[in-house]
């Protein structure tokens, strides 16, 4: 017992141990949980407004996110540049990296605004009913037109996350959620003198809260103390070489996010062809799954930061320790939630029931959702491997492997089988979910294998630093 506590104390205190990881990740987990609460509240209000708006919100929101996430992956790689520059003790370069992320976010926002007008054709191609397609198009268009604010949020937050200062991110996200929740209520239902906008009100509330968060980030970043150390004001000039490096590593990271979400979006669109009850049950399960997934992103960003800083200092062993610590803590969290999904699914599902819903109709949806949640509980444990190892590999710059692996497995194991299965072999809801679960499990195992190989330890993200010793990769001690 004494040895156990001594070992726990060592793991707690060492670089990359539990204490350092929790210091970074807990505010991020709160931030991601606030995003989860925001999305969960959207679904809850829309579900109580009508089943049609609930059925339309998830595929439309996920479709918008699918288009955004490529650019988000590029922009969010600013975090790794800031982390590695901080680790290499080059703070002015961190300020320049921030501005390149801002420029990429602005340009990406323009492209997404143009793509906002393609939503109707997308949902028509998916074969959704006319009323559902109309609601999906409205929600999709508003989110895409306001996507630039979400991208700027991501770019600006990297200035803090890359330096390991995650409390400001938490505070700003909590303010955003605090604004979003009442705006949802006022704009969806038309309360307090606001017009009743239904599903459009939910989208407007989301964009408004993101715009407010951008303003808050600007106010706290571009202050005199940050100007003295990081040159955040004078570093505004476009740096072609640095931006090229950001795109070189960030674009595969964007591909990773895009193809992953693209596969799941196609999955949802195909489930929509099975019927409204199947789609509603899947949407409920996906909304509940956000409770598990989004906080894990906090651990993933934290481990990317710690790995990036360790690589900037040329200390890969610290990166291994941080990854192992993150995986252990995440697995405890995931196992707990998986048990809740299995033991108390109806309690979670009933939250989405509206007073206007037909009792028998919602009972049919609930019966399907209970089984779907069991699939979610099963693959969630493997999803922890995926998220943590992907974060570690991203922090070291191994983004090309992440991008192409996701592309191959997602298209080959989810998009093609589910599309062919639903359209030509008329497979049911449970078969579709079984295919998706198998993909997530395999992905986690592949990422674990890649990390254990150790090739990421020889990668160079930032430009060579003369005073920094060469990277000599140590053995990977127990990469699990």
Image: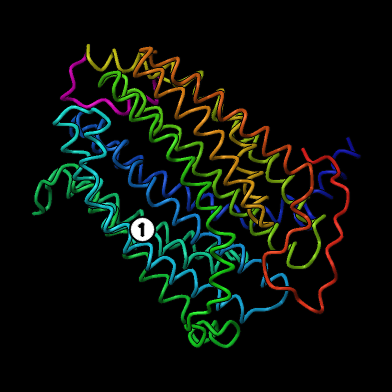
Q: Residue at x 88, y 53 (%)?
A: 474
Q: Magenta segment: does it hold 353?
A: yes
How are the residues colored?
A: rainbow
Q: Is residue 304 left or right of residue 10?
A: left
Residue span colored magenta = 346-359
Q: Magenta segment: does it hold 393?
A: no
Percent across and percent down for residue 419 are 39, 24
Q: Residue at x 23, y 50 (%)?
A: 141
Q: Is residue 283 left or right of residue 33?
A: left
User: Height in image: 103 above or below 182?
Assistant: below
Residue picked out by circle 1: 176
What count of labels does the image hold? 1
Quarter of the image where the N terminus is located: top right
Q: Is residue 17 left or right of residue 220?
A: right
Percent across and percent down for residue 264 are 43, 34
Nearest to the observer: residue 315 or residue 202: 315
Nearest to the observer: residue 207 or residue 239: 239
Count neighbours of disc 1 (C-alpha within 10 A) and say few if under 14, some if 14 to 19, many if 20 or more: many
User: Height in image: 449 above or below 180?
Assistant: above
User: Height in image: 225 above or below 264?
Assistant: below
Q: Residue at x 23, y 37 (%)?
A: 46
Q: Residue at x 45, y 33 (%)?
A: 289
The part of the image, by quadrant, that contains residue 465 is bottom right
Percent across and percent down for residue 228 are 57, 88
Q: Secondary structure at mark 1?
A: helix
User: Height in image: 43 above or below 393?
Assistant: above
Nearest to the observer: residue 463 or residue 101: 463
The part of the image, by quadrant, that contains residue 3 is top right
Residue situated furthest right in the rendering: 3
Quarter of the image where the C terminus is located: top right
């Amino acid at each position: 017992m004494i040895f156990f506590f001594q070992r726990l104390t060592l793991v707690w205190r060492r670089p990359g141990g539990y204490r350092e990881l929790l210091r970074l990740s807990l505010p991020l987990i709160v931030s991601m949980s606030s995003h989860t609460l925001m999305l969960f509240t959207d679904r809850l209000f829309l579900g109580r407004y009508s089943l049609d708006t609930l059925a339309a919100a998830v595929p439309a929101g996920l479709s918008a996110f699918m288009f955004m996430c490529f650019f988000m992956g590029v922009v969010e790689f600013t975090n790794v540049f800031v982390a590695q520059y901080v680790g290499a003790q080059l703070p002015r370069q961190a300020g320049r990296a921030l501005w390149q992320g801002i420029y990429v976010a602005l340009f990406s926002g323009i492209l997404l605004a143009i793509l906002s007008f393609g939503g109707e054709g997308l949902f028509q191609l998916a074969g959704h009913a006319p009323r559902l397609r109309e609601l999906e198009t409205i929600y999709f268009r508003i989110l895409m037109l306001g996507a630039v604010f979400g991208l700027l949020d991501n770019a600006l937050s990297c200035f803090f996350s890359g330096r390991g200062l995650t409390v400001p991110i938490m505070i700003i996200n909590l303010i955003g959620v605090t604004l979003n929740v009442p705006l949802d209520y006022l704009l969806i239902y038309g309360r307090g003198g606001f017009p009743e906008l239904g599903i459009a009100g939910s989208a407007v509330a989301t964009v408004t809260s993101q715009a407010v968060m951008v303003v808050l980030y600007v106010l706290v970043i571009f202050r005199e103390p940050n100007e003295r150390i990081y040159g955040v004001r004078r570093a505004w000039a476009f740096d072609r070489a640095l931006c090229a490096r950001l795109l070189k590593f960030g674009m595969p990271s964007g591909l990773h996010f895009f193809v992953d979400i693209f596969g799941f979006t196609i999955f949802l669109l195909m489930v929509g062809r099975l019927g409204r009850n199947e789609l509603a049950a899947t949407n409920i399960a996906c909304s509940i799954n956000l409770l598990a997934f989004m906080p894990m992103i906090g651990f993933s960003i934290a481990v990317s930061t710690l790995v990036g800083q360790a690589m900037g200092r040329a200390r890969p062993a610290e990166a291994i320790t941080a990854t192992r610590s993150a995986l252990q803590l995440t697995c405890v969290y995931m196992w707990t939630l998986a048990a809740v999904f299995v033991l108390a699914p109806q309690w979670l599902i009933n939250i989405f029931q509206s007073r206007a819903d037909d009792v028998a109709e919602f009972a049919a949806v609930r019966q399907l959702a209970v089984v779907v949640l069991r699939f979610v509980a099963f693959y969630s444990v493997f999803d922890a491997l995926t998220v943590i190892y992907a974060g570690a590999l991203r922090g070291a710059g191994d983004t090309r492997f992440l991008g192409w692996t996701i592309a191959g497995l997602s298209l080959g194991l989810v998009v093609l089988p589910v599309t062919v299965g639903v359209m030509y072999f008329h497979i049911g809801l449970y078969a579709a979910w079984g295919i998706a679960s198998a993909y997530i499990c395999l992905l986690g195992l592949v990422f674990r294998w890649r990390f254990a190989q150790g090739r990421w330890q020889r990668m160079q993200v930032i430009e060579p630093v003369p005073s920094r010793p060469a990277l000599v990769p140590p053995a990977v001690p127990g990469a699990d």
